[in-house]
Image (cartoon, rainbow, N blue to C red):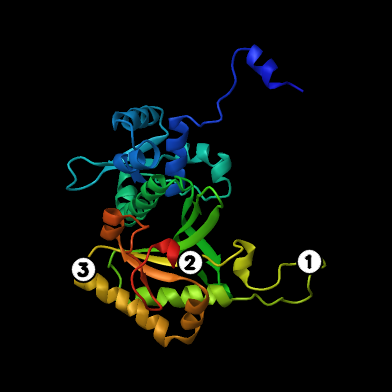
Amino acid sequence: MTTAFEARSYGHVPSPAEPLPHQLLAALGQHRMATTGQLHGLLRPHAQRQAVSAPLNRLRHEGLVDFTVLPQSNGTRAWYLTGEGARLVRDFPALRGRPPYPITSATAASLKTPHTLTVVRTHVAFVADARRHGDEHGHLDWTPEVSHPLSDGEKVIADAVMHYTLGSESQRTKLRAFVEVDRATMASERLASKLIEYARLWSYEPQPVGRQRRQPAVSGAVWLRWYPVFPRVLFVLTGASRYVLENRISDLQAMVAQHPLVGALAREVPLAAAVLDDLELHGPSGDVWVPLAGGEPVPWTAL
């Protein structure tokens, strides 16, 4: 067996830290798309912007990434993986099992930008807050477009699943959340009905069909296949006036009060909503989250 001393004697010990180009490719593979500023905030917030834009341009020269220019943005670039880049990152350990969803053209990219970049914007707010508080939450701790099965072949798709670890000297607390990002592009009732989907996922226990297989199966709710505790459900709202967004939060609260299954979910699982501008101004750990079961705004970690 090669010892650490023997490895050093040969002159080069591989660094455990991933180089920035690798991190950029992984971040784009995870998030589908991100602006230069968002990648800067996720990966190198204390460095000059050039520290991120230069390797992005080199990756573009190598045919692994490309960009589309956002309209009315003073030339802001939204980066995405090319087909070649998507084929490369699917073998990254952190991304194994994730569908690559390569974007094949700038036109296709432009159709995805509004919602995708708003979801990334939400993630950046959590990453910045985690850094301020010494918590663990990085660019790969946020998985967009996560699908879970419901009965009758239906499924619920979360805009993102967040993994977050509160750090302290005495203990570490692992938190998970389904995150729904609402840009006020759908009817308020349709947004509120998303709570019914999560309530169905929380209560759904698949029934065996035909003769049971001999190997043991996990009994109970289907979500136990992926989570030890059902993740809290967080709605992040933007894209309209404060008055409109507060009304949409009220409609979410009404769904909790009126729907029996959603009400049962709310008694077991923290549910809350916040305005994206407030997350960016005060941080997700501020008193900006309105509990959907009622009560004063609190930090999301205190729900």
Q: Helix or strand or loop: what does disc 3 sit on? A: helix
Q: Helix or strand or loop: what does disc 1 sit on? A: loop
Q: Amino acid at mark 1?
A: Pro
Disc 3 to disc 1, how far (Cα)?
A: 51 Å
Q: Quadrant of residue 193?
A: bottom left
In this view, the residue in front, 261 or 53, is 261
Q: Along the polypeptide, which appears first: circle 2 or circle 3? A: 2
- Disc 1: CA contacts within 10 A as few (<14), some (14-19) or many (>=20): few
Q: Which residue is mark 2?
A: 232
Seen in the image, is 15 located left or right of residue 20?
right
- Disc 2: CA contacts within 10 A as few (<14), some (14-19) or many (>=20): many
Q: Along the polypeptide, which appears first: circle 2 or circle 1? A: 1
User: Percent position (x, y) of residue 20?
Assistant: 43, 31
Q: Along the polypeptide, which appears first: circle 3 or circle 1? A: 1
Disc 2 to disc 3, how far (Cα)?
A: 24 Å
Which residue is painted at 53% across and 75% down in the image?
A: 268
Which residue is painted at 36% across and 51% down in the image?
A: 120
User: Percent position (x, y) of residue 271?
Assistant: 43, 71
Check residue 216 in the rendering and tell me which mark sits there, or answer none: 1
Disc 2 to disc 1, how far (Cα)?
A: 29 Å
Which residue is painted at 40% across and 85% down in the image?
A: 257
